[in-house]
Image (cartoon, coloured by chain):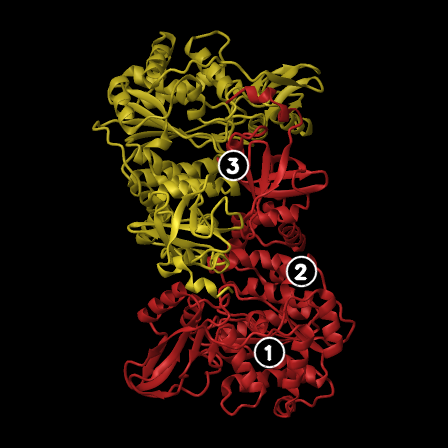
Chain colours: A yellow, B red
Amino acid sequence: MNKQKVEAGPVQNGELALKRVAIDTYRENVAYLHRDCHVYRAEGFQALSKIQIRHGEHRILAVLNVVDDDAIVDPGELGLSEQAFTQFGAEAGARVSAAHAEPPRSMEAVRRKMNGEILDEQDFAAIARDINEHLYSKTELAAFLVASGQTGLDRDEILYLTRAMFETGERLNWDEPLVADKHCIGGIPGNRTSMLVVPIIAAHGMLIPKTSSRAITSPSGTADTMEVLANVELSPEALYHLGHQHRGCLAWGGTAHLAPVDDILISVERPLGLDSQGLMVASILSKKLAAGSTHLLIDIPVGPTAKVRHMRQALALRKLFEFVGDHLGIHLEVVITDGRQPVGRGIGPVLEARDVLQVLENDPDAPADLRQKSLHLAGRILEFDPDVRGGFGYAIARDILESGRALEKLQAIIAAQGKRESRLEPGPLSFEVKAREDGIVTAIDNYRLGRIARLAGAPMGKGAGVDLLAKVGDRVRAGDPLYRVHAEFKADFEFARQLCDRDSGYQLGDTPPPARIEPFN
Amino acid sequence: MNKQKVEAGPVQNGELALKRVAIDTYRENVAYLHRDCHVYRAEGFQALSKIQIRHGEHRILAVLNVVDDDAIVDPGELGLSEQAFTQFGAEAGARVSAAHAEPPRSMEAVRRKMNGEILDEQDFAAIARDINEHLYSKTELAAFLVASGQTGLDRDEILYLTRAMFETGERLNWDEPLVADKHCIGGIPGNRTSMLVVPIIAAHGMLIPKTSSRAITSPSGTADTMEVLANVELSPEALYHLGHQHRGCLAWGGTAHLAPVDDILISVERPLGLDSQGLMVASILSKKLAAGSTHLLIDIPVGPTAKVRHMRQALALRKLFEFVGDHLGIHLEVVITDGRQPVGRGIGPVLEARDVLQVLENDPDAPADLRQKSLHLAGRILEFDPDVRGGFGYAIARDILESGRALEKLQAIIAAQGKRESRLEPGPLSFEVKAREDGIVTAIDNYRLGRIARLAGAPMGKGAGVDLLAKVGDRVRAGDPLYRVHAEFKADFEFARQLCDRDSGYQLGDTPPPARIEPFN
């Protein structure tokens, strides 16, 4: 320990100069102190994992990295990673002080959860508040998620968590009695029904201001695919304008700060591969409530490689959605759909956008399953309208699609959001995966095909992905192409090819699979 | 996406130049890629949380930070944080490639644990192996720890985990039938009995090559206090030499790579405040087995502010130690001791070293409780010697201490490890905390006093800490000093003073507390 430091200048006021360090640490606030920091013993702080940094009213918690390079921070500076700097809100050069940070107070409730206790409404409110204020480190978030996923939150706890997550963010207010929405629980590549459902519903005149997520672990989210055609980053004001003017939009939900706690939890949940039904319900419903939706259709695909593998799980999940939705005052219906293979042909933003446009243009070559599923979902949503007779929704949806009014509506929405002049061109590097024998396609692994598209570069590479040339039930001969993989970068191309070589994701057999999923297996 | 990149030079081979980034990220490997990286889409990688970096046979997993500053890494470079760079083992400038990292295969077992299943011996072996190879991220480690702590590992699982942790590291081999050791489960500040027990046992001729940890969340570990007097960073060769030459040593365990998985788990466990008995037993016994110990005395202090608060918990913990110890072939005994207040007077490296020397010098002013407890523990260890009659250990220990042979032995060990010429001088900044009323000290909060000493700068500041001037049972008058806080830095001094102002950690009352802890409460 160098005692001279005690007498040195900056120690007198115990402050350091704030610096923005141009490192993006992905949803974890990081502070950088030089190992020979003039004020604090950087190493002593580090094992404690978190420090609080202050400047007047500005406060932030961060984990500490110790730096040995003056070019990053010098001994008189305290650096913050990019997001942390923005969130802290003070200017570069501001005099800041640091202190040992206590764990967030609500960690006491998380510890009770770890011990298997049931938490009450106040506990979940406190946890959501502390998470929203970025007081939780990633390991603390993991502790909360694992403890919640493991003992399985009970129904009331899921309700409390959903409400707490919803109430910590902004809420869009549409001032209308019927604000429709739809959501699929995910896991099925190519499932871009929203881009068909929204224009159909909006063309009918029902308000459906759809906000979607970008892909995190999937090859494309609705926001990624829509972004091929139009700008999706809309301010809340632009969202209101579009909703009122055109009755619908297809925007990315990230700019509106809806249920921000959900985004923070997801950033830890996904890499860990956690998938508890309770956390899923809280995530989806908190986002939809924050988006101002009053009527919501939930799509639960079931299949051996879908998120939900058995009908009985789908039914349990449906009840859970209904319980929480009813208590939070949202009109909610659930449809259970066939999730045995990807929907449509394309997997990846450009390829999916092509499928969607084919359906809207009533192209006879359009993927029939995507068209059929979208009409089914749109029909159910149309029946939220008190003036639509039960059972008539599907026919109305089909009329809107076949008349070209849905295409017109999507074009209007695209123009209003800001049209993109990108051509729908798949990635220039491509290879085909071929059948090794004659047979009938009996199964296509959703997870595997999603991963291949992802490794090929989707969704960041808009043209990257997979184009399915044979679907379940199709008869193929040895050497026939099963699908084509597109990539934009050589490295991605190689990653994807290696994965395909290990396992194509296709199963061939002698007899065709059953035409529909069994209702009670 | 800038398609020009596809044609650019570095893409052809898909490799980047390795750079050492001078940032210490504390047991988490971090890779730095420029946002405009020539080869990979840095942002696409990031959400997946981990990448694998390769150069020939060298491989490492790291979480990814995206950099916007060429001074840290430029678009043709891949940076690694300090420990990651060292661990990776390639030279700066080496051509490296990166790929999406799969989660470690044993995470599948962790997921089963999260679902409440009981894992088998192979599962724990695979988990320990993957952790040892640094394949787990901090959130994955947290998931394993929370899942294991929560359902409570059963006895067999704790045995498997202990064995797996022990077998993933080196083992010291002493080639002697009796290698004695002692360990306290911790939580009691000032409890530096090892520095008295080791010289007593070694003076008797019994081998006791003690390796200790440094403090993580406590104000001082045995290694920190011993370091005031001697070098504690010894190679395994130096350890063997000391053991055989002097029959004992007091070294830091970190250089010998004993049960390295334990160190990795602790780096996540401590900041989360996890304290499951199962994990504690696995941690302690894996380290002791790796150190080559054959006979082990475990000290479990019990008290309202100790780690173990009730006698019944202490008994359950004792059985668990016995079960695992017996199955792993270590002769193990447990003593349950009085943990109602700190032991000795000093808390912090220099102050504790002073206490230890006072006892060894038979100074009449030496802290009686530290002397008494050390003799008690040493006596029990001496009875591991088949030639010592049951019940005679204490008297032998006392004779060794009073004769001055223990002091001589510690001096010999210090000389052999490398004497430090530091003066035993407490930190120059100090303040006293005084009694606000007349009364008898009825309780001293171990946790609180430890935190005060820690905030005052211990253990990094060797002279920082707390000097207790009154102990439980002492009668004080208003204005009498209860303890003195020493600091070396102004910032630490202020942190500690603020904490003392909120709560001194002392309780005063009218009647003296019972002389000993109740055996069955």
Residue occupied by mark 3: B46
Q: Residue at x 41, y 83 (%)?
A: B469
Q: Considering only vertical position in the picture, is B385 above or below A323?
A: below
Mark 1 / mark 2, whichever is N-terminal: 1
Q: Secondary structure at mark 2?
A: loop
Please state the horizontal and vertical placement of residue B6, each as a whole percent of the image.
59, 21
Please state the horizontal and vertical placement of residue B150, each as a whole percent of the image.
49, 57
Q: Amino acid at mark 3?
A: Gln
Mark 2 / mark 3, whichever is N-terminal: 3
Category of crowding for the residue at label 1, using alpha-carbon neighbours closer than 10 angstroms: few (below 14), some (14–19), many (at least 20): many
Residue occupied by mark 1: B195
Chain under numbered label 1: B
In the visual, does B387 lie left or right of A231?
right
Q: Residue at x 34, y 41 (%)?
A: A324
Residue occupied by mark 2: B257
In the rendered image, residues at marks 1 and 3 fall on the same chain = yes
Quadrant position of residue A39? bottom left
- Nearer to us in this view, A287 or A342: A287
Q: Considering only vertical position in the picture, is B12 above or below A421?
A: below
